[in-house]
Image: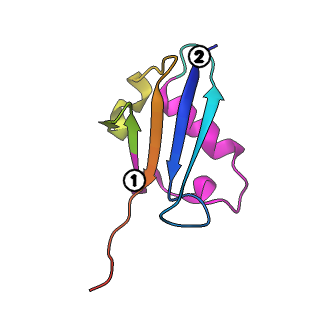
Amino acid sequence: MPEIKLRLFGFGSRASGFDTETKNIAAGTTMRELWETLRSTADDDELLARIDEKNIFFLVNGKFIRQAEMPQIVLADGDTVTLMVLAIGGQT
């Protein structure tokens, strides 16, 4: 069973914070399947369950993945998957 490192930036209690976990996935799991699983298993009050995927950067091993590519990206043992909430704005 492949094992990946999952990094979630901006989904926790602090917008600038991140969580990292090791996750076992089924062989042949695509990026799209991982995303759907993460969303469907998140609590309804979690940002992960409610956020529109257009507001997330998806990276696999540091490489940006477009949403249209997600069904073709098969994750492998040792991959690092990063989901980062798109943040716009700041202080002026």
Name the quadrant containing residue 24: top right
Residue 88 position, x and y percent, is 33, 69
Give amino acid for label 2: Pro
Quarter of the figure with the C terminus: bottom left
Quarter of the figure with the N terminus: top right
Q: Is residue 61 left or right of residue 8?
A: left
Q: Nearer the viewer, residue 50 or 22?
A: 22
Disc 1 secondary structure class: helix
Q: Residues within 10 Å of mark 2 (few under 14, many from 20)?
A: some
Residue 42 part of the magenta-drawn span: yes
- Segment colored magenta: 30-57
The structure residue drawn at horizontal position 48% and vertical position 17%, both measured from the top left corner, is 76
Does residue 17 lie above or below 6 as drawn? Answer: below
Q: Which residue is mark 1?
A: 54
The structure residue drawn at horizontal position 48% and vertical position 21%, both measured from the top left corner, is 75
Does residue 60 lie above or below 19 as drawn? Answer: above
Residue 37 position, x and y percent, is 63, 36
Residue 7 position, x and y percent, is 52, 43
The structure residue drawn at horizontal position 47% and vertical position 35%, both measured from the top left corner, is 81
Q: Nearer the viewer, residue 31 or 18?
A: 18
Q: Which residue is mark 2?
A: 2
Magenta: main secondary structure equals helix
Give amino acid for label 1: Lys
Instruction: Check residue 41 in the rendering and tell me which mark sits there, or answer none.
Output: none
Front tag of 1 and 2: 2
Residue 28 position, x and y percent, is 53, 14
Mark 1 and mark 2 lie on one chain; the one further toward the N terminus is 2
Does residue 43 lie above or below 76 as drawn? Answer: below
Q: Is residue 47 left or right of residue 62?
A: right
